[in-house]
């Protein structure tokens, strides 16, 4: 990896295009390096993982509405949409599938200077691959780039510190991945990356306070914008430049300011794209920083005994966990029993309480209104708080994978005065965790979430195709979806009439 210093440059400075970060990203995208076998293997896992959570969310209102919008844009050759037959304009397919994948907040994650769900790259890159008649090997190369650029930006450029939503890293990564997929030249990818960043930079209010369905729509929007940016760039249209480093660019006005400098690592020429191997998926449908606390709560239940005897619980954790999903956010909604699922998903106090009581976590039952409004749950929930611990913050930002941690130390004080303490640094499903996910676990996750939604024979067909992704020929990528019956689709709320 080569580290590139990135800072603001005045318009009067001599700052050649080949030194722009967007150009360096484009150079990575256009480097025809082979994809390592372990990278390709993990890409297949994540294609399965995305389909799993899309199946589970298929009949939810935001997904149904995004699908209804997309069905108004049929196109041939076009791209597939989870749940239905036919093909649709690729940017709209990326939109519908992106919402389905993100709705339950249940797919892969990477946390560093910023946080991200790199699997959000799959819907737009796959949609373009299907539409353009590319091969499975082309798709794998495109996804390797999408993950690489996403992870490298997340390692180095913090967005949330400046209240910018993390999908600002997704537009450029998806555009770069599409560029690799299509074999575009560096200039075209450069322009597409700049356009994608410019159109997908927004505030992070979507993840603050009363969190709405836009939390799922935001990454789908970024993917849709990436597809459109590539289309425009292929037609010769340019982007604001230098997009990150310009005098009125992203760094100067939206991030650290004109005097800030970032160090962005990117693969050098001929260096394989392996960043996907540093990412991790979720066993539980909750914000990633809740994964280890859920496992910790399950582990502590036996030691605590009668939960009615709990006086208080303090979760000592990283700054990020404390201020994003903990009491450091100062969001009263995180203690509201009538809050939206999206808000409860971002309340580690609620999540820890339910995991303690139930000893498990379910993507629907754990968020049901009747579950959140149980009097004993509310009582326990209000006894839980978070506190930042500098050591957990240091470990959160560590570049050493054996030290990096996203968990917490729980101090449970009983009414008797006894204190029960335990901690867990990483989730059980993490690659270094107690039960790391492998292909068998990804398949089991798909089977579990698709049960009662996708017919068993269709599950088998999809899983067979997905596991053969690198060998799929041109025209065969439409197999990387699933359909369901009209009866299943009828369970979804009927989408009101919009513009389309």
Image: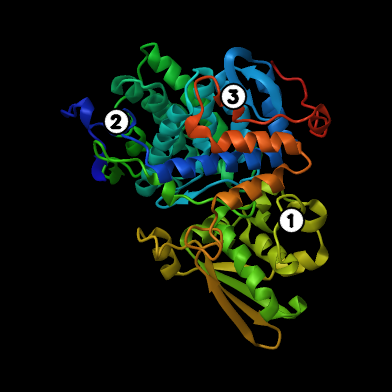
Q: Quadrant of residue 71?
A: top right
- Image coordinates of residue 395 in percent, x first then y, are 41, 64
Residue 116 lies left or right of residue 2; in this view the side is: right
Mark 2 or 3: the one toward you: 3
Q: Does the CB distance between marks 2 and 1 fall below 8 Å?
A: no
**Residue 392 shows in this picture:** yes
Q: Which residue is mark 2?
A: 31
Q: Using a 10 Å C-alpha cutoff, classify the residue at mark 2 as few (fewer than 14 neighbours), some (14 to 19) or many (20 or more).
A: many
Q: Quadrant of the N terminus?
A: top left
Seen from the viewer's position, the closer of residues 266 and 135 is 135
Q: Which of marks 1 and 2 precedes in the sequence?
A: 2
Residue 478: assigned label: 3
Mark 2 or 1: the one toward you: 2
Q: Residue at x 41, y 21 (%)?
A: 182
Residue 242 lies left or right of residue 37; in this view the side is: left
Secondary structure found at label 2: loop
- Image coordinates of residue 402 in percent, x first then y, are 40, 64
Q: Residue at x 61, y 27 (%)?
A: 479
Q: Which residue is mark 1?
A: 366
Seen from the viewer's position, the closer of residues 12 and 455 is 455
């Amino acid at each position: 990896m080569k580290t590139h210093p990135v800072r603001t440059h005045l318009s009067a400075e001599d700052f050649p295009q080949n030194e722009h970060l967007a150009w360096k990203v484009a150079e990575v995208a256009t480097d025809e390096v082979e994809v390592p076998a372990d990278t390709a293997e993990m890409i297949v896992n994540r294609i399965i993982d995305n389909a799993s959570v899309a199946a589970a969310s298929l009949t939810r209102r935001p997904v149904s509405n995004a699908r209804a919008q997309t069905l108004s844009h049929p196109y041939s050759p076009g791209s597939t949409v989870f749940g239905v037959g036919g093909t649709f304009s690729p940017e709209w397919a990326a939109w519908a599938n992106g919402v389905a994948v993100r709705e339950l907040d249940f797919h892969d994650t990477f946390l560093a200077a910023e946080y991200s769900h790199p699997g959000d790259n799959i819907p737009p890159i796959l949609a373009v691959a299907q539409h353009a008649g590319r091969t499975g090997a082309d798709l794998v190369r495109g996804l390797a780039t999408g993950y690489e650029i996403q992870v490298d930006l997340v390692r180095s450029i913090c967005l949330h510190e400046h209240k910018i939503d993390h999908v600002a890293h997704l537009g450029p990564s998806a555009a770069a991945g599409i560029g690799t997929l299509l074999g575009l030249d560096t200039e075209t990818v450069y322009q597409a990356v700049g356009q994608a960043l410019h159109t997908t930079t927004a505030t992070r209010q979507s993840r603050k306070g009363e969190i709405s369905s836009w939390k799922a729509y935001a990454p789908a929007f970024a993917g849709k914008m990436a597809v459109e940016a590539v289309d425009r760039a292929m037609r010769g249209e340019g982007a604001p430049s230098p997009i990150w480093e310009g005098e009125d660019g992203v760094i100067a006005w939206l991030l650290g300011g004109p005097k800030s400098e970032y160090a962005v690592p990117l693969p050098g020429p001929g260096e394989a794209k392996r960043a996907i191997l540093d990412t991790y998926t979720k066993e539980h449908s909750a914000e990633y920083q809740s994964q280890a606390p859920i496992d910790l709560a399950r582990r502590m239940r036996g030691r605590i005994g009668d939960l009615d005897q709990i006086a208080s619980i303090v979760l000592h954790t990283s700054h990020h966990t404390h201020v994003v999903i903990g009491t450091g956010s100062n969001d009263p909604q995180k203690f509201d029993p009538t809050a939206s699922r999206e808000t409860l998903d971002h309340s580690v106090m609620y999540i820890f309480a339910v995991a303690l009581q139930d000893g498990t976590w379910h993507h629907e039952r754990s968020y049901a209104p009747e579950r959140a409004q149980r009097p004993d749950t509310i009582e326990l929930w209000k006894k839980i708080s978070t506190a930042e611990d500098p050591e957990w913050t240091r470990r959160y930002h560590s570049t050493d994978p054996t030290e990096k941690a996203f968990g917490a130390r729980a101090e449970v004080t009983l009414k008797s005065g006894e204190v029960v303490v335990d901690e867990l640094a990483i989730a059980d499903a993490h690659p270094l965790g107690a039960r790391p996910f492998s292909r068998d676990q990804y398949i089991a996750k798909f089977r579990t979430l698709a049960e009662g939604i996708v017919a068993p024979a269709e599950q088998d067909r999809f899983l067979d195709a997905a596991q053969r992704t690198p060998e799929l020929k041109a025209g065969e990528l439409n197999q990387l979806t699933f359909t369901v019956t009209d009866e299943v689709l009828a369970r979804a709320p009927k989408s009101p009439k919009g513009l389309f």
